[in-house]
Amino acid sequence: MKPLFRRIAVTAVWLAVVGSAMGLLAAYSNTPGLVASAPTMWPAGAGIALERDRPTLVLLAHPHCPCTRATLGELEILMAENQGRVSARVVFIRPNEFTEEWVKTDLWRTATAIPGVTVSVDEAGTEAHLFHAETSGQTPLFDRSGALIFEGGITESRGHAGDNAGRSAITALLHSSSIPYSNLRARTRTKDEDDRRRAPIVTPVFGCPLFAANCAAGETKCKK
């Protein structure tokens, strides 16, 4: 093969490999995590207190999820834009086999530095189970009566900082005197539920799994 043709062939192969890798990365970045529907009312037995004078936001997080850094950045913006309008709780999961030091990562320190946010440890994932959370970054919002008005994430994709549907929806809800509801997702409700309410606003959650393989002993970060 002549040198020129060889260089062209090598370049073509290189471009194909790079293009394929970039495509896989883009697909991963835009693939949301599993979202289990949050309870329609504040769960009984929750260790987190529901505020009665303003809505309560709960962010369930894995302390080693790299995607959650962007989520915390969006939460900081959200809190700055809605001072006094919402009570925010960030809850970091700690499986039984890990020490409390395992939880207190740079993500923990970032969360504790956000004004107006209370940070706590979720022992054995008890709170995550009560709020039906499966993915780090899942952020349900409940009104003063304990009714779910938003569930989902507050980033546009994995690790992406910037304007997104989740943060915009929460801000709109917090600035509304009537707390509007959305029919973005139909939901089957039982007669025991408040059928006067429509479905809460729902957005995708981009983050690592809270449970299973990423929480196995010896892991230092979430598996992708």
Image (cartoon, grey):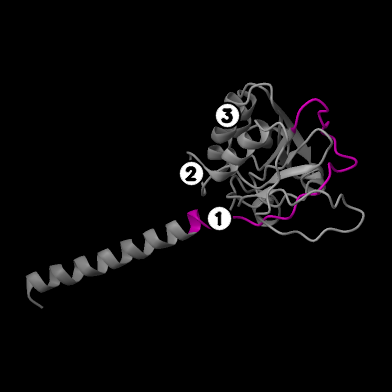
First of labels 1, 2 by sequence position: 2
Q: Is residue 189 visible?
A: yes
Query: Residue 149: where, in percent of width, then height?
Result: 73, 43
Amino acid at pointer 3: Glu
Amino acid at pointer 2: His
Residue at 67 percent of width and 33 percent of height: 176
Q: Which mark is drawn over residue 76?
A: 3
Q: Which residues are magenta?
A: 28-55
Q: Is residue 216 visible?
A: no
Q: Residues within 10 Å of mark 2 (few under 14, many from 20)?
A: many
Query: Residue 173: where, in percent of width, then height?
Result: 66, 36
Looking at the image, the residue that sits furthest to the bottom is 1
In terms of depth relative to the viewer, which is nearer, 38 or 196?
196
Mark 1 highlights which residue? 224
In terms of depth relative to the viewer, which is nearer, 154 or 121?
154
Q: Residues within 10 Å of mark 3 (few under 14, many from 20)?
A: some
Which numbered mark, 1 or 2, is in the foreground of this view?
Answer: 2
Mark 2 highlights which residue? 160
Looking at the rendered structure, the secondary structure element under dot 1 is loop
First of labels 3, 2 by sequence position: 3
Looking at the rendered structure, the secondary structure element under dot 2 is loop
Query: Residue 81: where, in percent of width, then height?
Result: 58, 26
Residue at 65 percent of width and 30 percent of height: 175
Q: Is residue 17 left or right of residue 173?
A: left
Gap in angstroms between the C-alphas marked 1 and 3 = 25 Å
Gap in angstroms between the C-alphas marked 1 and 2 = 15 Å
